[in-house]
């Protein structure tokens, strides 16, 4: 079922089962509105529910990723360190899993012709980002640790669906390696943000005062990070 809200086009995805007690809406990407309803809910009322929540949907759309955020086709592009680089797909019947190589400003995806699923290509890109995250982000930690005199116990890189970074109570910092798609200033913001949590564990006024002391335009970087592509 398709619905138009201003200039946006959405597909309504309807989920229903006996465990659902009330109607709810969610945006899991920029193209689909998921409506969950009790079993007895009549499908012809779905559009009415969506129109009723139009304002919320249009506000929320800026905070969710597109469905297929990377175009894994020859001529598509991959964001890396704030720039977009072209993709070349190279078929190789001898390999089992997709391999990613970045050289001469081109992302090469070596894949078996039998592999066609979007998620397989996305997983391969994530694996590449994870492999090189330390190489590109560790030097930023070195710089900001020196400038702030704040030093973590440990730095690790892993994927997180909703967070760019975290700092534990014992000052172990975890960074989402998918940050590598953004420009260096945005990555530096996350690095500095987590380092500031060594001094201030919550998002208090003191925390933001400390953050702004070292990065006066941190709100600009926060806005950039809202437009994630994964």
Image (cartoon, grey):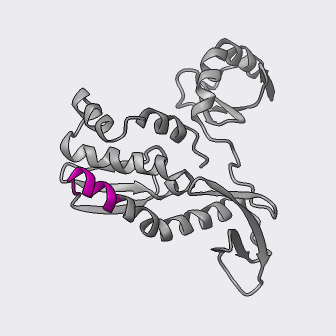
Q: For the image shown, how many numbered marks are present on the structure? A: 0
Residue 15 placement (x, y as % from top left): 65, 33
Residue that appears at 44% across and 32% down: 219
- Residue 89 lies in quadrant: bottom right
Q: Foreground residue, 164 or 119?
A: 164
Q: Which stretch did the figure color magenta?
A: 141-151
Kindly identify the residue that appears in the image at 70 percent across and 72 percent down.
109
Pick the residue in front: 37 or 227.
Answer: 227
x 31%, y 62%: residue: 142
Instruction: State the image coordinates of residue 41 (x, y, percent, origin top left).
Output: 67, 20
Tell me: 177 left or right of 174.
right
| Residue 112 in the image: above or below residue 44 | below
Above or below for 70 versus 45 = below
Q: Is residue 106 above or below residue 210?
A: below
Asked if the stretch drawn in magenta spans residue 51, the answer is no
Left or right placement of residue 69 versus residue 166 in this view: right
Task: Locate the N terminus and report the quarter of the image it occupies.
Answer: top right
- Which residue is nearer to you in this view: 48 or 195? 195
Q: Main secondary structure of the magenta part?
A: helix
Residue 14 placement (x, y as % from top left)? 69, 31
Whether residue 17 is visible, yes or no, is no
């Amino acid at each position: 079922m398709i619905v138009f809200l201003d200039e946006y086009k959405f597909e309504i995805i309807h989920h229903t089962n006996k465990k659902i007690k009330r109607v709810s809406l969610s945006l899991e990407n920029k193209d689909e509105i998921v409506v969950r309803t009790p079993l007895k809910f009549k499908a012809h009322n779905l559009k009415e529910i969506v129109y009723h929540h139009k304002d919320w949907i249009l506000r929320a759309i800026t905070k969710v990723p597109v469905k297929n955020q990377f175009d894994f086709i020859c001529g598509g592009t991959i964001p890396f360190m704030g720039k977009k680089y072209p993709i070349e797909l190279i078929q190789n019947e001898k390999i089992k899993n997709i391999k990613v190589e970045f050289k001469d400003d081109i992302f090469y995806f070596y894949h078996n012709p039998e592999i066609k699923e979007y998620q397989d290509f996305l997983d391969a890109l994530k694996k590449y980002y994870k492999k090189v995250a330390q190489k590109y982000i560790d030097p930023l930690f070195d710089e900001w640790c020196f400038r702030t005199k704040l030093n973590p116990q440990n730095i690790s890189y892993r994927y997180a669906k909703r967070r760019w970074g975290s700092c534990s109570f014992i000052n172990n910092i975890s960074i989402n390696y998918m940050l590598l798609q953004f420009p260096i200033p945005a990555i530096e913001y996350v690095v500095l943000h987590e380092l500031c949590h060594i001094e201030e564990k919550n998002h208090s006024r003191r925390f933001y005062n400390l953050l702004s002391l070292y990065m006066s335009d941190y709100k600009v970087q926060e806005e950039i990070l809202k437009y994630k592509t994964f």
